[in-house]
Amino acid sequence: MTPTGIRYISSREQTMQDRTGALGRLEQVVSTPEEFERVVSQALPILLERATNSTKRFLRETGQWCDDVAHEKFALRWGAEYLEQFFIAGRSEVPCRPLFLLDAVVAKQHSRPEPFCYHPDLLTPLGRLIDGLVSRAAISRDALIALYYHCFGLGPGQVITVLGLTGPAGQRIYKNFKRWRDSGWQRTMDDMGITECEVQDLCSQLQRHPQPSNSEAERIIRIAQSHYRKSEPDHYPCLSRRQWEEMFLEGYGSDYRIWHLALCLDCFTAAWDLGFRGAAAIEKPRVEFHVRP
Ligand SMILES: [Zn+2]
């Protein structure tokens, strides 16, 4: 089982009794990698909550906490990140007590000089820009919709078609685009400290070397997407082509489509032609990164 394949189930679905039982099992010694996987897989919501709460506590104690959605999602993403590290490390740490091993993994991260150390690729100018756009998308719908433009160059009409939206849900897309162009993009650049000079450099780099720049952008987009998708771990997991097809045909889950397809290249590619309902045979989308809105 790979960490990215983890299907989180809602913690609300677990009764208190299940929780106490699961906590008890997590405190006992597991002796083989298989046993570790089994015990841990059955208790993912509990472990995610624990890692997220430790992260919140750490942020509070270090004066970096604020009661808002952005911070809640930040703590949740890092909780999920630590849970993945724990899942990978745990197999080779047996015999161990899973609950205490998770605490140790999290504490080790929090005691590093740069505790939320980031992927080095996200520290280049292009990486910072993409990271900033995708991180904003985790908390702002305008930024989320704008990803379809920044990553693929799609305009509002195309976004509506590709996502199979109808009625008011479609109308909102035009407003999202307008607000992003009017002010959202500039505010995001300012917040990230990306200067006009850097924006110009990136634009000319994309113009001069479109192919290598776009494959570099695609690589970074994947890294950022997989990190920020952890903002909604139990709500919008990846689906198979069949499941997407059903959703498009039946017309439900417009929030699911909007959110997940903006943040998952693989599902976006898989679901790409479903919104066209066979009307147009358009080749698979490729990353064509746009710096400006
Ligand atoms: Zn996906």
Image (tube, rainbow, N blue to C red):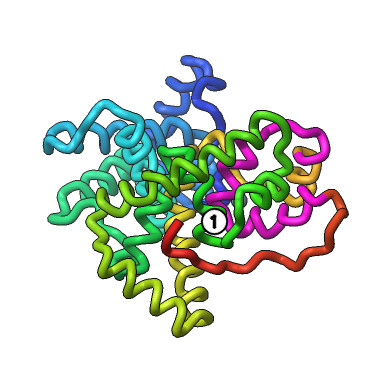
**Image vertical order of residue 262 relative to residue 14, above or below:** below
238 relative position to 272: left or right: left
Quadrant of the frame with the C terminus: bottom left
Asked whether 270 falls inside the magenta stretch, the response is: yes
- The residue under label 1 is which amino acid type? Tyr
78 relative position to 158: left or right: left
Q: Decide if residue 95 is in sight here.
A: no
Q: Nearer the viewer, residue 175 or 260?
A: 175
Q: Nearer the viewer, residue 157 or 151?
A: 157
**Image vertical order of residue 217 relative to residue 14, above or below:** below
Q: Position of residue 148 (x, y in %)?
A: 56, 54
**Image vertical order of residue 123 relative to residue 8, above or below:** below
Tag 1 secondary structure? helix
The residue at the point 82 percent across, 39 percent down is 249
Asked whether 99 falls inside the magenta stretch, the response is: no
Q: Magenta residues?
A: 248-276
Q: Decide if residue 151 is in sight here.
A: yes
Residue found farthest to the right: 278
Q: Position of residue 8 (x, y in %)?
A: 54, 37
225 relative position to 161: left or right: left
Q: Position of residue 284 (x, y in %)?
A: 71, 66
The residue at the point 57 percent across, 61 percent down is 153
Q: How many neighbours does mark 1 have within 10 angstroms: few (below 14), some (14-19), or many (20 or more)?
A: many
The residue at the point 56 percent across, 21 percent down is 13
Main SS, magenta region, reads: helix
According to the picture, the residue beneath numbered tag 1 turns out to be 149
Residue found farthest to the bottom: 208
The residue at the point 33 percent across, 43 percent down is 102
The image quarter containing residue 29 is top left
Q: Nearer the viewer, residue 141 or 2?
A: 141
Q: Position of residue 186 (x, y in %)?
A: 33, 51
The image quarter containing residue 278 is bottom right
